[in-house]
Structure formats: C-alpha cells, structure tokens
Amino acid sequence: QVQLVESGGGLVQPGGSLRLSCAASGSIFSMLAMGWYRQAPGKQRELVAITGGSSTNYGNFVTGRFTISRDIAKHTVYLEMNNLKPEDTAVYYCTATIVPIGPSRAQTTYWGQGTQVTVSS
C-alpha cells in the first residue's frame, strides 16, 4: 500500500505565498508522476500542476504564479504558490502515479486526503 501525506495548507492574505508538500511512502517500485489538483466548493476538481519524467504541466489559471518541484529520492513533491488570490481558495489534493512493488507492475494512482488553502483578508 502507498500513503500520501500533505502539509503546508492554511490561511493566507491575498498576495501572499504558501508552500505545499506531499510525501509518498510505502510499496513504491517506481514513481511515474506526482502533482496537485484542487477542488473549490461547488466546483469540479481541476489540475493545478503535475510533473513526471521530463514533463511538467500546469492548469491554465496558474499563469506563472505557482511552481511545482520534486525530490525524486524522497518521493516528495512541492507546490510553491505566490501572489495568491481569493479564487485560489480550495482543498488541494496531492496525487501520485506509481508502479508498486509486486508481481503485477500495474500503474496505480493514489490521492492524498487534501489540505485546505484559504486566501482571505
């Protein structure tokens, strides 16, 4: 089994910054991709940023304000968020696509429990 533990959410004023972290642990043979999605009340979950191999993708709304990075050795992904806006308020979910240890080698996507980010004055 694989666990994702998120940290770094909280309350921040508009224009402020936050750094989210997500560490994966467990039966990991190969980490294919890690990233972040978010879901605001009454809205669908949307991509924030995801990175894997040599590829990194951001949601259209990011416009250079967020940066995703990854510590491959630690199976950890970070999301640096700057110039936060009230509309960034949401639960942010970490995701990881992994090939687990074992005979099947089937790719599996895991989700964290989410961390609340609130942008308000």
Image (spheres, helix red, strand yellow):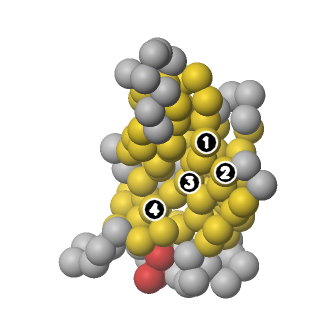
Residue 29 percent location from the top left of the image: 58, 23
Label 4–label 3 contact, CB within 8 A? yes
Label 3–label 2 contact, CB within 8 A? yes
Residue 117 percent location from the top left of the image: 44, 62
Query: Gap between marks 3 and 2, in whole Å?
Result: 8 Å
- Badge 1 element: strand
- Badge 2 element: strand
Please tell me whether residue 100 is drawn above or below residue 91 in the rendered image.
above
What residue is shown at x 72% (from left), y 60% (from top)?
55
Query: Gap between marks 2 and 4, in whole Å?
Result: 15 Å
Residue 67 percent location from the top left of the image: 71, 64
Residue marked by disc 1: 32
Q: Amino acid at mark 1?
A: Leu
Residue marked by disc 2: 52
Query: Gap between marks 4 and 3, in whole Å?
Result: 7 Å
Residue marked by disc 4: 37
Choose the circle earlier in sequence order: 3 or 2. 3
Query: Gap between marks 1 and 3, in whole Å?
Result: 11 Å
Q: Is residue 93 visible?
A: yes
